[in-house]
Amino acid sequence: MDNTNPLTMAADEKLSFDKFRDEVLRDYRIACISREASLLARKEVLTGKAKFGIFGDGKEIAQVAMAKFFQPGDFRSGYYRDQTFHFAIGQSTVEQFFSQLYADPDIKNDPNNAGRQMVSHFCTPLTDEKGEWLDLARRKNIASDMAPTAAQMPRSVGLALASKLFRNVESLKEMKHLSDNGNEVCFCTIGDASTSEGHFWETVNAAGVMQIPLAIFVWDDGYGISVPKKMQTTKGSISNVLAGFQKEEDSNGIHIYKVKGWDYAGMCEAFDEGIRLARQYHVPVLFHVDEITQPQGHSTSGSHERYKSQDRLAWEREWDCLKKMREWLLENALSSEEELSDIERQAKQDVKEQRNLAWQKYQEPIKAQVTRSVELINSLSDNLPDQAAALKKIATGLATNREPLRRDVMKALYDAMDLAGDSDKAYWTKDYYNELLNANTVLYDSHLYNEGPASALNVQEVKPQFDQEAPLINGYEVLNRYFDQLFTNNPKVVAFGEDLGQIGDVNQGFSGLQAKHGADRIFDTGIRELTIMGQGIGLALRGLRPIAEIQYLDYLLYGLQPLSDDVSSLHYRTFGQQSCPLIVRTRGHRLEGIWHSGSPMGMMIHSLRGMYVCVPRNMVQAAGMYNTLLRGNDPAIVVECLNGYRLKEKLPSNLGDMTVPLGIPEVVREGTDVTIVSYGSVLRIINEAAASLEKHHQVSCEIIDVQTLLPFDINHRILESLKKTSRIVFVDEDVPGGASAYMFNKVMEEQGGYRYLDTAPRTITGKAHRPAYGSDGDYFSKPNAEQIEAVIMEMMKE
Ligand SMILES: Cc1ncc(C[n+]2csc(CCOP(=O)(O)OP(=O)(O)O)c2C)c(N)n1
Ligand SMILES: [Mg+2]
């Protein structure tokens, strides 16, 4: 095309200038709208319409700049300051932002959290209703925000690493809906003070080592609530102190940029270059966005005048990013005073309108409940003259409540029913109360796990089959053959952990498999349990099926925070819109010494509601559990028996197809006198005790392996056994009051087991201290066969 004609060139230039001007003004408009939203939202909290507010004022310009480079397929893993970014990429409206503020539980009004999270916590759906992954490569994706500082860091490793795998692994290349040749960047935001967390350092180091497309934006407003950065960061500057991570021509590392949070043009330039490097070459980048302000202070919980000096407050007013961008627009003749004032005025008005709309939508269903309840209670008062005055008072109280909540409605209905006692006049009131109870259960108590087709609970049992000639091999060899088949048949599975790649894990479950299936699918990691978990989370969110290893169960504590805060709450807090099908593989219960024999099952089941907790007693059972879990979308942890890898097991012929159903116990020995409920390694000791009791005392034990602690015996199989034996003992290796108390509670209270007891139920557990080293240390720290026999003999005499 001939474009040397000066007239055409001038027209082109004008066109591109107009386009540029429009884009810049659009950014300014969004920034103004976002600021107004922060100002008005704070007022809503202070006047009592909402409970808490935390906003992105002061960070607007940085975020409109950042949004320019966020493309379909990219992920953001950030924190609670990023509302402007979400407005700018079109992910959220101001109305939805206010719906969040009011905790509106209607997913249509708050599509991010259905009212379950505080304001400024965002997410986009990753799966459809059937649990199928959406077309993520063509969507702008937000990993659900969290409040714990730096909690967004670990998973950002996996979100970025996924791009590398999609680019490098041949069998993943056809999954076009999940990735476009690994061109996706993970945008990760964090506050200056939160970089003090170990999460930050582990993430930066892992990204530098692995060379993944991770772009970290540090919003540096100089404070973490009241604590200034000189008390948070060595040298008071995150970019200075990170200098050693700088990537050189012949090294790995990260690219570090320092920019100013009010300098729109400077940020656009740096972000453009940095994101390009990340996208194209998979190099991590970090933008230290300094000189950011907090016009309204940290949150609605306090005022920053308490801890910022007058000088600092004056500096923040002067260097407010909106003010600076305004000056820049005028200096560069991109706009006029009049036009900008117009934008600002319009922003105020828009935000007010959207606020009103959100409030109206939030109140509508509650008002309807109030109207119906008042009608019912009034009609009850007409029918119950003795209670009429008290009932009228309840109705009036509810009717005159200016900002009623759902709980006010429930309380009024309950109080009215209570006054009506057994009277059948209260039939409709009770009926309505129950209707609301059910509706509120859906709003507030649903989606902890997948409930539809993606639930692993739908997986039916396929028992292991054994050929006549089935070989007897070591437990680890069973797993090794299992993983080999799995990696051959399922391209989405990847596995990683300390010593898992080259040597095939410390117990050889993966021995030889890296050479066969490739170092992009089976690989070593640094010693960094926290980000190994995060790596798994991110890969799972992007549609892969990671098996992330914690080398020994005792080291789970290092990786527990993301599992508890992020993984376990994810499906619940997103109202089922995001799933994290991560499998954590680990080994524990019983070997040697304080840090290689732990069985902290109580800690796990209490902190990991939202995950499945599988406790196989052998490796065939473990393989069946992996098969089951891989058919669902929920996360799980599998605790293999540390002392089971060298025990002989028969090799099933259907390793790849057999499944162990979750929440279905297995009776491993039938008996009539006492039910012993347990799981994992200690079952072998219980078997010994049961054999001895039978032989020497003719006591017949029924042994039940629960197989999974979460879920626990969904069909109440244990109760059936208890009905027969009338005696029950719960045995495990956890501390007293740990998982044994959980099992006890499940059977006694939930299953109503107390009704079938002839003697007091018992628990036999490990000691309260950590297990001592050596065979005697084990014997006296963990349940032993003699102790189990003695307890059961005592029960038989009662
Ligand atoms: C693990 C954890 N500890 C403490 C808090 C309470 N808290 C919330 S925000 C915050 C300060 C964070 O400061 P910074 O990272 O600089 O982000 P900013 O709020 O300044 O943008 C603290 C201590 C928390 N949310 N999580
Ligand atoms: Mg800060």
Image: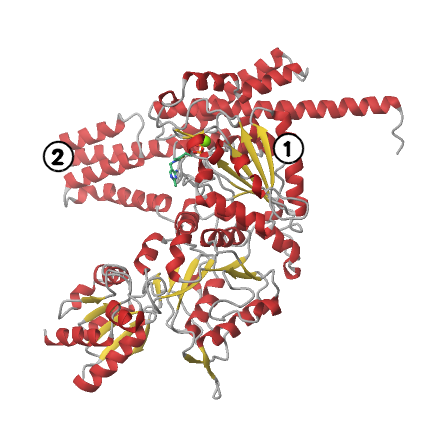
| Residue 387, numbered label | 2
10 Å crowding of disc 2: few (<14), some (14-19), many (20+):
some
Q: Amino acid at mark 2?
A: Gln
* Count of numbered circles in the view: 2
Residue 128's place in the image compared with 588, above or below, is above
From the top left corner, tell me how far across and down residue 637 is, in percent.
Answer: 41, 60
Q: Amino acid at mark 1?
A: Ala
For ligand 1, the image quadrant comes to top left
> Where is residue 346, by image quadrant?
top right
| Residue at 17% across, 68% down | 756
Q: Quadrant of the C terminus?
A: bottom left
Q: Nearer the viewer, residue 363 or 172?
A: 172
> Where is residue 259, by image quadrant?
top right
- Marks 2 and 1, Cα distance to the nearest angstrom? 72 Å
From the top left corner, tell me how far across and down residue 743 is, in percent.
Answer: 26, 62
Residue 589 shown left or right of residue 722 in the figure: right
From the top left corner, tell me how far across and down residue 269 is, in percent.
Answer: 66, 31
Residue 9 visible, this angle: yes
Residue 671 visible, this angle: no
Residue 441 shown left or right of residue 396 in the figure: right
Q: Quadrant of the N terminus?
A: top right
10 Å crowding of disc 1: few (<14), some (14-19), many (20+):
some
Give the mark toward the camera: 2 or 1: 1
From the top left corner, tell me how far across and down residue 208 is, in percent.
Answer: 58, 47
| Residue 270, numbered label | 1
Q: Earlier in the sequence, mark 2 or mark 1?
A: 1
- Asked if the residue at tag 1 contacts the one at tag 2, i.e. Cβ–Cβ closer than 8 Å, the answer is no
